[in-house]
Amino acid sequence: MNVIYIDTSDGSLRICIVEDGRLVEYFKDDMQSQGILGNVYRGRVENVLQGMEAAFVDIGIGKNAYLHIKDALEKDHLDLKDKPSIDDIITRGEDIIVQVIKEPLGNKGPKVTRHISIPGRYMVLTPFSSRVNISNKIKDISESSRLKELGKMIMKDEMGMIFRTVSENTEAELLKGEYEQLYKLYKIIEQEKNYLPTPKLIYSELDLLSQIIRDYYKYPNTEIVVNDRSIQNKLYNNKDLSQYDMEGKIIFDPDFNMDYNMNIQIDMKEALARRVQLKSGGFIVIDETEALTAIDVNTGKYVGNFTLEDTVLRTNIEAAAEIARQLRLRDIGGIIIVDFIDMKSHSDMEIVVEKLISSFKGDRNKPIVVDVTKLGLVEVVRKKNRPTLDNKVSITCPTCGGKGKIRKNEA
């Protein structure tokens, strides 16, 4: 049983996703500054840089948004072999419709695209693609075929869709109804490009609470624990959430507080530490930098019961599962390099990599194992949408500047 814990005891909205008794994701919303990921804006192009093949767009949030050429191409340009240059398709002072695909990080503004997509409960509408895609988690071939045929049948104006995992075995009428709803919403967004002012917000993604229910609530395998009666009422009465069968799944516990839940706090403390202990006695070390994240695996106190090869393999397998959980919980994105303990056997390395890949399946940001280098380093990439957990809940020490070290007296 998975649990969604919703806590407002400190004046903010905090949400924890717990799977199989372990914390896997953490969200926080201060209820005053809503995130902008997924929002659609009418913006004005402030600058076009041919040397960077990019443009900067004012969307009205203080920092100009970054628009790369691949995200700026019109629908009829996407399949061309010889793509036009950035200044052929966009000009300074032009008003365009864009969607935020990456929130501001540090000094960087948000990243945007003109390829709008609208998410729903069962599918994501993709107006810039005419394909019908199916979630990789739907393994039943006959069900995948049913959804693909249904998608082709209900498609309008060559606006494709991605069927999400929860669409599996869902009635055709329900899926058709959601497609119609998303299609109409996109048409409204399209019309807004003709109306002033600029910049302005055209479409706002659901609030954090609604997003979490949409993306993580799966009947009947999920419970929701809340400590605020108004949140409970919102879950029951919000029309955006009326399609989810939550009757009997919402538990009101006024005494629940995330800060005093031992299991959640242990996992949170671990997620903010550089070193993460494994049950066997081994440990992993996680170092985040601006360019990439490096993860090192060590046997520590674990000496095993059989051979050295067996000890190393067992430690690496355990570490692979924990690395997948830590990346998801810490919301680490970009390039990730994993240095597993050296293994002589190629087949042992394949087992560890397979364990890592299988442990990624629950991660909505879809990490990908790119390669295993000649030195045995495993290269992983993970989508980066938001600031990491460390950035959300901590600030850089003004004394050491984030190094975590002080100089020796003799220095």
Image (cartoon, grey):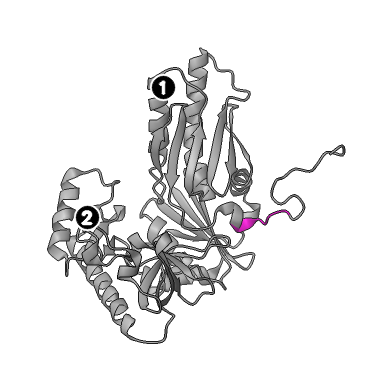
Please name whichever residue, 86 or 276, is drawn nearer the observer in this view of the structure: 86
The residue segment tinted magenta is 392-397
Mark 2: which amino acid? Lys
Residue 98 x %, y %? 37, 71
Q: What residue is pinned by disc 1?
A: 348
Please name whichever residue, 136 or 111, is drawn nearer the observer in this view of the structure: 111
Q: What residue is pinned by disc 2?
A: 81
Is disc 1 placed on a helix, strand or loop? Answer: helix
User: Magenta stretch: dominant SS?
Assistant: loop
Residue lying at 42% horizontally and 28% vertically, measured from the top left: 352
Q: Residues within 10 Å of mark 2 (few under 14, many from 20)?
A: few
Q: Is residue 396 located in the magenta-colored stretch of the structure?
A: yes
The answer to whether residue 41 is above or below residue 22 is below
* Total number of numbered discs in the rendering: 2
Residue 10 seen from this side: yes
132 relative position to 336: left or right: left
83 relative position to 388: left or right: left
Q: Earlier in the sequence, mark 1 or mark 2?
A: 2
Q: Quadrant of residue 53?
A: bottom left
Residue 258 x %, y %? 61, 55
The Cα atoms of the two marked residues, 1 and 2, are separated by 42 Å
The answer to whether residue 91 is above or below residue 274 is below
Q: Is residue 324 located in the magenta-colored stretch of the structure?
A: no
- Residue 31 numbered tag: none
Residue lying at 69% horizontally and 49% vertically, measured from the top left: 402
Q: Quadrant of residue 281?
A: top right
Residue 79 x %, y %? 21, 58
Please name whichever residue, 192 or 185, is drawn nearer the observer in this view of the structure: 192
Mark 1: which amino acid? Asp
